[in-house]
Amino acid sequence: MDWHQINYFRTVAYTQHITKAAKELAISQPALSRSIAKLEDELGVSLFDRKGRRIYLNRYGKMFLTRVEESIMQIEEGKREIWRETHPEHGTISLSFLPSLGASMIPEMVSAYQKEHPHVKFQLAQSSNRQIIHQLKERQADLALISYYQEDEDILCFPLLTEELFLVVANDHPLASEEKVDLHMVKDEPFISFKEANELGTIIHELCVSAGFIPNVVFEGEDIGTVAGLAGARLGVSLVPDLKLLDREKVTLVPVTSPVCTRELGLASLKNTYQSPVVREFVSFVQTFMTEKQNQRNDSHELFTTEYPGFQEGQSCPLRRRLQYICHPVGNPAAPAGDCGGVSRITCDGEPDPIIGNHRIGGWASRCRIALGSLRPQIDHGLFSLHLIRHRPFHRAFIKL
């Protein structure tokens, strides 16, 4: 029994005339008669009573027609459901991601997409790299944000961004006051790593080996928050990305110069499988979104200096003392400070300084950023100069734009 037989039967049932039905279906009358006869043979009963050139549905035919109509309704509803699920403006996207990306990246990305496509729905799931790969293979997820993965020929993964890993230590650890460290400096320290399911454990091991030692792992945590918390309790050190969820009152993140400590994040999907229009649209959006985010970061955090080599263009400035900024009219540093309300924020350790005004005293910080906001055009036109002051010891850094 196939779809053509069902459709032919339905048409004959409504016309109750073979010749008229054949004309409507655009097939020959003998071909239609053979199809109906084959269907009756398969069902084991006659569906029509014949009287001359006319045919009439018998009770078996009426019974079968009812089920045929129900089936067709279900098929049509299935077609509409698939349309709703796949349409770029109304579909559903199943997205899996690493737990560490759930603090900011995923919420920002999904929120930005739904502003442009308010009727698109998301099914979100967070898990380890290994579990996410399994979800992709089982077609439980359309896409995944994972550590860049090239070990499986069934998985297609293209690089999305490079995330720096920092040495995380307690605030009173001897290395907390260092501007930067070589990973070999912690070869004798106890290490807090991650359980096997978390890819960061493998990354940490490989980085330590490249630095010339095997880490002395004393504990393995499941998530970054737990690992950082144990480091804050002076139970060991580890390597983690800079996340908002880290408790900066207890831990310090120290940049590692050698080896380069990073992890690659990628957008993954299953090879040789159908991607709906809404999924393809989201893939394109993610690529554009990440590029724009990187460009915005470069534009809003440009720092230049001729006095303090710690500041680098487009990067956060490493400060481990209290931070103050003063704004003066150009050419007259002795004049009263101008209105620096245009400095939209100074961010220390990922958290914004709560005080806004002509003078700002920041808290203890390991890394700080300045976003110039509306003050940028005034500085560009030479109306103001911006100074950062680093205390203990006193150090003035002139930011020239």
Image: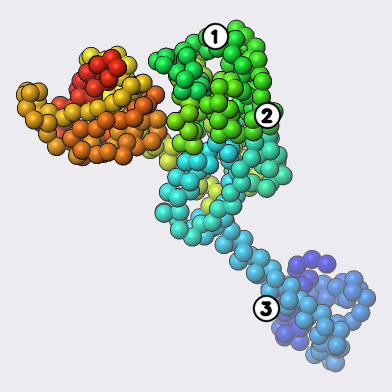
**Separation of residues labelled 3 and 2 (CA atoms):** 67 Å
Q: Residue at x 69, y 68 (%)?
A: 75
Q: Is residue 228 above or below residue 35?
A: above
Residue 81 position in % (x across, y down): 62, 64
Q: Residue at x 30, y 22 (%)?
A: 313
Residue 102 position in % (x across, y down): 53, 42
Viewer-side label of 3, 2: 2
Pointer 2 residue: 195
Examine the image and state in which quarter residue 25 appears. Answer: bottom right
Amino acid residing under circle 1: His
Colour setting: rainbow
Task: From the viewer's side, name the closer residue of 400 and 76.
Answer: 400
Give the mark nearer the N terminus: 3 vs 1.
3
Say which quadrant the N terminus sits in: bottom right
Residue 155 position in % (x across, y down): 65, 35
Amino acid residing under circle 3: Glu
Pointer 3 residue: 24
